[in-house]
Image (cartoon, helix red, strand yellow):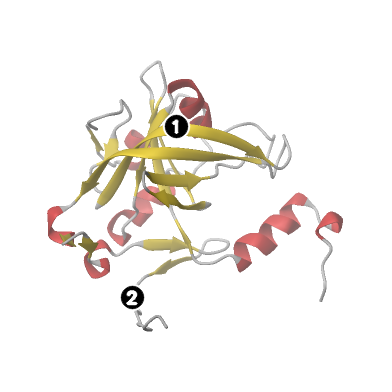
């Protein structure tokens, strides 16, 4: 089958992309609105941009229902800061709770029962249950795609501080068996990092 993307609806294109680009790491992003309300939401369009300075990239897409911006992006636009938390299997159900479409002003920390912990360089809290958290300050925003459903904004942020749980790190190498990270697939499916294999680089 050969598919011309110009013939697809937004939902059809979305299904093909998220079913093909797998597994995807999850950026569990915590922000604070200028009025103090906390926000917490997962995003699976997420990767590393650079290591010096450490730079992370994620892309919140617009709401499929009405094409509006999500609270995470609005808060980052207004404050320029946020925290990206790594998701472990131990709190994946709580993370899933925060993906619900709720009214602005709802605190997803309270909704999920996860614990906000103080950050050092940004006002947004980190997730205490997360084994690794990156305090970030916004470098730049890059709009991509449409202004409506299916469009997004690439958020490029420079890491200001890194929080790592002591038992999982040795000589700057992290133990995946202890982190137990969770990846995103399509639909309601996730994956675990449990089957590791090694191939020496040529």
Q: Is residue 107 visible?
A: no
User: Is 35 or 201 nearer to us in this picture?
Assistant: 201
The residue lying at 60 percent from left, 42 percent from top is 61
89 left or right of 97?
A: left
**Callout 1: SS:** strand
Instruction: Check residue 23 in the rendering and tell me which mark sits there, or answer none.
Output: none
**Callout 2: SS:** loop
11 left or right of 72?
A: right
> Where is residue 79 shown, x and y percent of the image?
43, 22
The residue lying at 60 percent from left, 37 percent from top is 142
Image quadrant occupied by the N terminus:
bottom right
Discs 2/1, front: 1
**Cα–Cα gap, marks 2 and 1:** 33 Å
The residue lying at 31 percent from left, 58 percent from top is 88
> Where is residue 23 shown, x and y percent of the image?
49, 66
> Where is residue 120 shown, x and y percent of the image?
22, 31
User: Is 172 or 2 nearer to us in this picture?
Assistant: 172
Of the numbered discs 2 and 1, the one sitting upstream in the chain is 1
The residue lying at 29 percent from left, 45 percent from top is 133
User: Which residue is labeled 2 in the image?
Assistant: 194
Instruction: Check residue 138 in the rendering and tell me which mark sits there, or answer none.
Output: 1
């Amino acid at each position: 089958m050969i598919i011309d993307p110009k013939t697809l609806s937004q939902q059809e294109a979305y299904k093909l992309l998220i079913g093909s680009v797998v597994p995807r790491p999850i950026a569990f992003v915590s922000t604070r609105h200028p009025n103090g309300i906390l926000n917490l939401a997962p995003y699976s369009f997420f990767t590393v941009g650079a290591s010096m300075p450490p730079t992370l990239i994620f892309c919140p897409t617009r709401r499929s229902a009405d094409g509006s911006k999500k609270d995470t992006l609005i808060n980052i636009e207004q404050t320029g800061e946020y925290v990206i938390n790594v998701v472990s299997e131990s709190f994946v159900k709580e993370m899933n709770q925060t993906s619900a479409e709720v009214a602005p002003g709802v605190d997803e920390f309270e909704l999920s029962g996860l614990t906000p912990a103080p950050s050092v360089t940004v006002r947004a809290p980190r997730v205490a249950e997360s084994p690794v958290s990156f305090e970030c300050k916004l470098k730049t925003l890059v709009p991509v795609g449409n202004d409506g459903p299916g469009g997004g904004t690439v958020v490029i942020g420079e890491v200001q501080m890194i929080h790592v749980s002591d038992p999982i790190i040795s000589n700057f190498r992290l133990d995946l068996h202890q982190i137990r990270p969770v990846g995103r697939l399509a639909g309601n499916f996730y994956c675990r990092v449990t089957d590791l294999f090694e191939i020496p680089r040529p």
